[in-house]
Image (cartoon, rainbow, N blue to C red):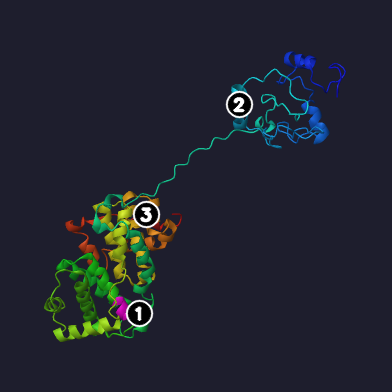
Amino acid sequence: MAGSDENNPGVIGPANIQRGLHGGGGKIAAATGQRRALSAINRNIIGDPPYPCAVTKRGFSEKPAIDAKIPPIPVNRPITRKFAAQLANKQQTKKPVPSHPISSESEDLAIIDVEDCKPMFVDHMEEVEMEDVAEEPVLDIDSCDKKNQLAVVEYVDDIYRFYKKAESSGCVPSNYMSQQYDINDRMRGILIDWLIEVHYKFELLDETLFLTVNLIDRFLAVKPVVRKKLQLVGVTAMLLACKYEEVSVPVVEDLISISDKAYSRREVLEMEKLMVNTLQFNLSVPTPFVFMRRFLKAAQSDKKLELLSFFMIELCLVEYEMLKFPPSLLAAAAIYTAQCTLCGSKLWSKTTEWHTSYSEEQLLECSRLMVSFHQKAGMGNLTGVHRKYSTSKFGYAARTEPANFILEPSF
């Protein structure tokens, strides 16, 4: 390999170093050892690189490399701007190469100029800046209740997951009335509409009303009842619900009086025993009210939204066709419909979707039925809910204009 610099262009000698410094385009480390040019190494060993910017393999001499501490150069790795900047910083911060000659037994190294080796694809590729898409966060609705032991923040999510699994136990077939030979769904609606007024007159808890309706449906789904005993079933169901939910329970004589003394005390007590035995004393079922409280909290509701939501769902209690929806969906759809009614546009946040586990599309069918009930709430014979929510106590919620845009096919 010995020879003059002029006769052997593949050898980097002092003369070639001067030409590289003054007329060449790349930076070449000063070295007195005999080294082959990078282009010659690439052509002889692995051929032309697939990309002009690719870092190719090092050329190997016939003798094995002595300096094993030198890290290998990555093969065929495109030099990106970030990687080139890192190399440039290393070149600037690297200590000067000592002037003493390198041993002839060391491995030949390829010296790469970062500035000359620019990636080809950068010139014809647009730089696209990734815009940060601000997704709506799911809020921690229980953060304000962490110090409230009655809120059971540690267990509330597990409790509602259990409610969601157990709600089917409180549901009835949506066509159970076909098994009744003497009553129909219209009679059921009249009974519940009357019970809503009784519930309002006695100033009972909301939980009591929803449990009363649940007990009536579950009993009628398995026990045939003649029409003259239907009101007795309703009164007895309210008595059981009061015993379960209320602190101060109405006496039997009050319920007999409110039903125009159509039944005796003995009849009420006998029907009470029949109902609890038929239902196997299972009164602990998730009703729509259970989910309403949680979902309203997720919706960050105010009093106006709360009253309108309960107006929507109480309209559904009277309607037999709404039995096809589970209690959790009824509660979520009532809140969704109320939000749309107040805002004049669809509104369903990520937080409410997360806690209800229902998307907007899943609620539309039920919501459209609620809007239709809202439109005709003050008409016909079943107007108990409308009269109740037309008072100042309930914020005149029934006077709110229905969200008719939900009924549009394109919505």
Q: What segment carries the magenta color?
A: 216-221
x then y, percent, for residue 321: 36, 71
Label number found at residue 352: 3
Quarter of image, res 175: bottom left
Left or right of 406? Residue 208 is left
Main secondary-structure element of the magenta-colored stretch: helix
- The circle drawn on residue 177 is 1
Q: Position of residue 262 (x, y in %)?
A: 16, 83
Question: Residue 17 or 229: which is nearer the viewer?
Answer: 17
Label 2 neighbour load within 10 Å: few <14, some 14-19, many 20+ = few
Alpha carbons under labels 3 and 1: distance apart = 34 Å
Check disc 2 and give the amino acid type. Lys
Q: Quadrant of residue 317?
A: bottom left
- Of the two numbered discs 3 and 2 in the rendering, the one whose residue sits closer to the viewer: 2
Q: Which tag is nearer the camera, tag 1 or tag 2?
A: 2
Mark 1 vs 2, N-terminal side: 2
Q: Nearer the viewer, residue 9 or 303?
A: 9
Q: Is residue 220 magenta?
A: yes
Can you tell which quarter of the image residue 176 is in? bottom left
Q: Secondary structure at mark 3?
A: helix
User: How many callouts does the rendering have?
Assistant: 3
Q: Is residue 309 left or right of residue 252?
A: right
- Inspect this view and state whether residue 302 appears: yes
x and y, in percent, of residue 113 in the image:
69, 25
**Disc 2 target residue:** 90
